[in-house]
Structure formats: C-alpha cells, structure tokens
C-alpha cells in the first residue's frame, strides 16, 4: 500500500471538509467556549484510568506510562462548553511538560492513590509548585483520592479531608472502576470553574502533521491576547 498517497488523500478530504464547513458558517473559523482541564499526580495513581472511564465507561488493567495525551469531553450540564482534558505524566523526567501545563491550563484535578501515602505527599508538592507558578492567579483545584474501592488506605477519609481543607481546596474520593464516581468528579471541577470566563477557542485550518497524527491549529484569545496551540484530530 502507498501510505503517502493514502495520507495525501486524507489530507485533501479533511481540507475539503473544513472548507465546506467554513463556507456554510460564513467564516473560516468556528468560535467555541473551551475549558482546559489538566489531570496531575504521581505515576500509577490512576489518572489515565479516570479519564478513560469518563469517556469510554471502562478501564484497562494494563499499565502504559503516559507522557502527555489530550482528550475532549462535553459536559452533560453545559453542552455548549468543550472541555480539553490533558492527561499528564507523573514521571520526573517530564517536569518541563508539567510546568508548561501549570502555566496555561484553567483548572486542575490533583490525583493521588488512597493506598499510597507517597502519592499524597507528591500531590502536595505538585500543588505547591502550581501555586508558586501561578502566583496571584490561583486556578481552580480539586483534590481527588482514587482507588477508594480497595480494602486498605493509608489514612482515614476525615483526616485527608482536614489536610486538604487546610490547603484551601475541596476534596473528593472515587474509584476509577466506577463510571458514576468518575463522572461526578469531572463534573464537579467544571462546576467549580468559571466557565463564563474561559478561553474563546477557534478551530483553525489544518496546520501540521507529526508521527502520522493530524493536527489543527487553535487560536486562543485571553483578554485580547492571542496564542496558538496545536490540537490532535487523530
């Protein structure tokens, strides 16, 4: 099979689709409300499982280390709001990615495992780093204790709630194996966020290709200041 030809044909088809959509709307871009949510925490606390349970209503037992993956979600309470969910790495070697995310995202889930006290301490370090980076513009944060379905935990729920309250944040527990739990967590951080003052996103023309994945350029405007990010289509 001529993969270059197949790829080229796909590019042409996508451009025609974008062009057709632009013609119908009378504009080359379609404006949308966009909330950017990042999920942060130590490795193996279930960040990816939470996201996949929300989107697919299932999780995989196989563990694959995440570097950085972007997912899209539409809130059931606000169907006009698009939520970009960024799944981040818990590995120390990707700290530069984490710092960039902390600077740019609107709200955050800070996740730890209820069976691993070290992951709770790591969550606190991540929280302190986030506050330091954002300084006066503290973003909305929801602290999440995952794996509440397991029989052992390192600390009673009341003690964790008290510790998180001292940090100034709301705390919730869930199991990534339960869809209802997971949905409540994500809908709660959306509720806590000021979705009337989020980025105005514009889906631009096809802009780039990397490792066989097709991207579009989205122009973000915050208080009249534009910035650009690349969003993976597939």
Image (cartoon, helix red, strand yellow):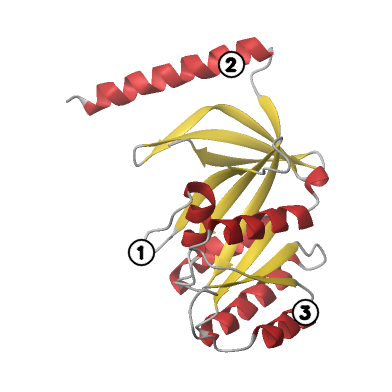
> Residue drawn 59% across and 44% down?
73
Which dot, 1 or 3, sits closer to the camera?
1
Residue tagged by mark 2?
Answer: 21
Residue tagged by mark 1?
Answer: 61
Residue tagged by mark 3?
Answer: 165
**N-term-proximal mark, 2 vs 3:** 2
Rendered position, 33 above or below 175: above
The N terminus, quarter of image: top left
Residue 118 left/right relative to 84 = left
Across and down, in percent, residue 87 comes to 52, 57
Across and down, in percent, residue 51 comes to 52, 55
Rendered position, 123 above or below 65: below
Is residue 78 or residue 4 the one in the foreground?
A: 78
Q: Is residue 106 visible?
A: no
Q: Residues within 10 Å of mark 1 (few under 14, many from 20)?
A: few
Q: Quadrant of residue 5?
A: top left
Residue 42 left/right relative to 167 = left
Distance, label 2 to label 3, CA atoms, is 48 Å
Q: Is residue 90 visible?
A: yes
Is residue 57 or residue 10 the one in the foreground?
A: 57
How many numbered circles are shown?
3
**N-term-proximal mark, 1 vs 3:** 1
SS type, badge 2: helix
């Amino acid at each position: 099979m001529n993969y270059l030809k197949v790829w080229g044909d796909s590019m042409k088809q996508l451009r025609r689709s974008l062009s057709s959509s632009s013609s119908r709307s009378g504009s080359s871009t379609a404006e949308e409300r966009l909330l950017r949510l990042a999920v942060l925490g130590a490795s193996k606390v279930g960040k990816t499982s939470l996201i996949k349970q929300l989107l697919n209503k299932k999780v995989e037992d196989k563990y694959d280390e995440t570097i950085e993956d972007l997912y899209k979600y539409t809130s059931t309470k606000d169907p006009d709001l698009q939520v970009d969910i960024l799944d981040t790495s818990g590995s120390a070697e990707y700290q530069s990615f984490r710092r960039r995310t902390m600077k740019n995202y609107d709200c955050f889930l800070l996740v730890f495992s209820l069976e691993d006290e070290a992951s709770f301490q790591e969550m606190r370090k991540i929280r302190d780093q986030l506050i330091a980076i954002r300084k006066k513009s503290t973003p909305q944060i929801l602290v999440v204790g995952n794996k509440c379905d397991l029989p052992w935990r390192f600390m009673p729920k009341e003690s964790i709630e008290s510790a998180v309250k001292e940090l100034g944040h709301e705390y919730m527990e869930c199991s990534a194996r339960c869809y209802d739990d997971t949905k409540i967590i994500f809908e709660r951080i959306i509720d806590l966020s000021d979705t009337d003052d989020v980025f105005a996103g514009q889906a631009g023309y096809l802009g780039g290709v990397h490792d066989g994945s097709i991207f579009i350029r989205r122009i973000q405007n915050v208080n009249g200041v534009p910035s650009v990010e690349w969003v993976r289509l597939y």
